[in-house]
Structure formats: C-alpha cells, structure tokens
Image (cartoon, rainbow, N blue to C red):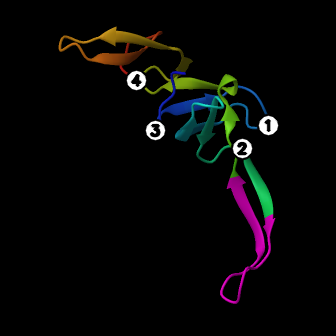
Amino acid sequence: MKFKKGDTVLVTAGKDKGRKGQVEKVDWKNNRVLVKGVNLYKRHVKPKGEGQKGGIVSLERSLPVANIALWCSKCEKRTRAGYQLSKGGVKQRICRKCEGIL
C-alpha cells in the first residue's frame, strides 16, 4: 500500500466519489484508510452521566484502499506513486505523470 498519513487523496468510488481529503490514519492490516471529512455517518449517543449530553454525532468511517487514489498537488491530477532513489540514497515517492515528489 502506497498511502501515508498526510497524503491528499481523491475518492474514486462510493457515496463521496470525487471528494478530496487528507489521510488521517492507515490500517495496514485491513487495507483501509481514514480520510478527514469523507465518509461521514450519524450516530445517536445516549448521555453517560450528569455532565455529558446525548445527541446525534457525525463520525468518520474508514474507506477501502481500492476506493481512493493519490492526488498530485503539482499537476492537479490523480496519479499513481512511483519510487526514485535520490543522490543521497534516500528513497522518495514520485508522481508517475509529472515526475514531481509526492
């Protein structure tokens, strides 16, 4: 999986198709990604004790990795990630379309 926390991604399938967001969390074990502001659901919460209120809360749920694509901010297109070794021997992710660093 080539997604990291902080990447900008485009949703390619589902109810939020076409929306962009930042990756907050990556679940490698289940191949799922939590994207900020995408895939929101409502949850009814009961009050727990005297100080807390009940109500309807919006929660973000994770998306399958197959439903998102990397977004290159340099060329403003969805892209795939490639890898390139820099002069210092450091491995960097690059955009396959514009060869810019992701």
Residue at numbered disc 1: 15
Marked residue nearer the N-terminal end (2 or 4): 2
Q: Earlier in the sequence, mark 2 or mark 1?
A: 1
Q: What secondary structure is found at the residue carrying circle 2?
A: loop
Magenta residues span 44-59
**Along the polypeptide, which appears first: circle 1 or circle 3?**
3
Is residue 37 shown left or right of residue 4? Answer: right
Type of amino acid at the residue the image marks with label 3: Gly
The residue tagged with tag 3: helix, strand or loop? loop
Q: Amino acid at mark 1?
A: Lys
Q: Give the mark, 3 or 2, whose residue is nearer the N terminus.
A: 3
**Secondary structure beneath label 1:** loop
Please tell me which residue is depicted at 45% across the width and 27% down the height of the picture.
Answer: 73
At x 73%, y 32%, the residue is 17
Determine the CA span between mark 2 and mark 1: 8 Å
Asked if the stretch drawn in magenta spans residue 60, the answer is no
- Where does label 2 land, which residue? 39
Residue annotated with mark 4: 102
